[in-house]
Amino acid sequence: MNKNNYYIPVKTIAKTAIKEMQKYLLSCKHSDWHPEKKADNSIVTPLEKHLDEIISALAIEMGLAVISEEGKEDKTILESGNYVLIDINDGSANLDYCVRKAFERGDINTYYTHDLSKRYYDHGLLVTIVENGQPHYGAILNYRTGECIFIDGSEKRYHQEFFPIPVQIKTTDILDPTITRFPGEHVYFNKSTA
């Protein structure tokens, strides 16, 4: 893959993940929310399994070999050194907590607003393009705030974008994103809705 094209598949994955996550949550019923225990005793939620299937299929459609935390292990892909590494949601327990709290309140929309100032409830997508065994480009997406940090490992640059959250959500207690600052001269801020 041409290193100038890393941004496009990573952004497409991030945009699709947040859109599909929002669709799932806004149609999810409490009775359908049953996290499962994995072999390492961590949990995986039905949302994570759903998103992993969609995002892994999308990456494959884009011609990327996939290594996914929730997917089947494939050592030949890993040994090739050329793949996209996906953790569909880093912070399963936090996701589970936030969704359960929203169900307790009787409104899944509160998933986006409950305890938003308490950053320890954060969770999100981690995606990295690896070539020749080296990470080259990645993104970290906060599902609750829509904040996405794109990291260019080759150029040692990064930037921030915000993806829209559903229009029916009226966020409160959210920090103004313009106050977020990162070190370095290569940072720029894009407040567009992608």
Image: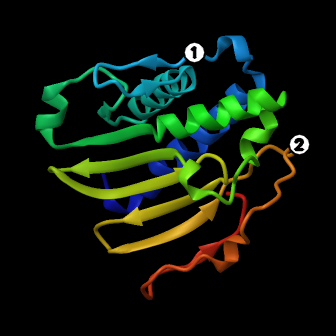
Counting every numbered tag in the picture gives 2
Is 143 placed left or right of 167 in the picture? left
Q: Position of residue 153 (x, y in %)?
A: 31, 66
* Earlier-in-chain disc, 1 versus 2: 1
Q: Position of residue 173 (x, y in %)?
A: 78, 61
Is 128 placed left or right of 7 in the picture? left
Q: How is the image coloured?
A: rainbow
Q: Nearer the viewer, mark 1 or mark 2?
A: 1
Query: Residue 185's image quarter?
Result: bottom left
Residue underneath mark 2: 168
Is 9 placed left or right of 46 in the picture? left
Task: Please tell me which residue is depicted at 39% across the width and 29% down the height of the picture.
Answer: 60
How far separated are the C-alphas under marks 1 and 2? 26 Å
| Secondary element at image label 2 | loop
**Local crowd size for mark 2, using a 10 Å CA cut-off: few (<14), some (14–19), many (≥20):** few
- Front residue of 46/59: it is 46
- Front residue of 127/113: it is 113
Task: Please tell me which residue is depicted at 38% across the width and 63% down the height of the picture.
Answer: 4
Residue underneath mark 1: 34
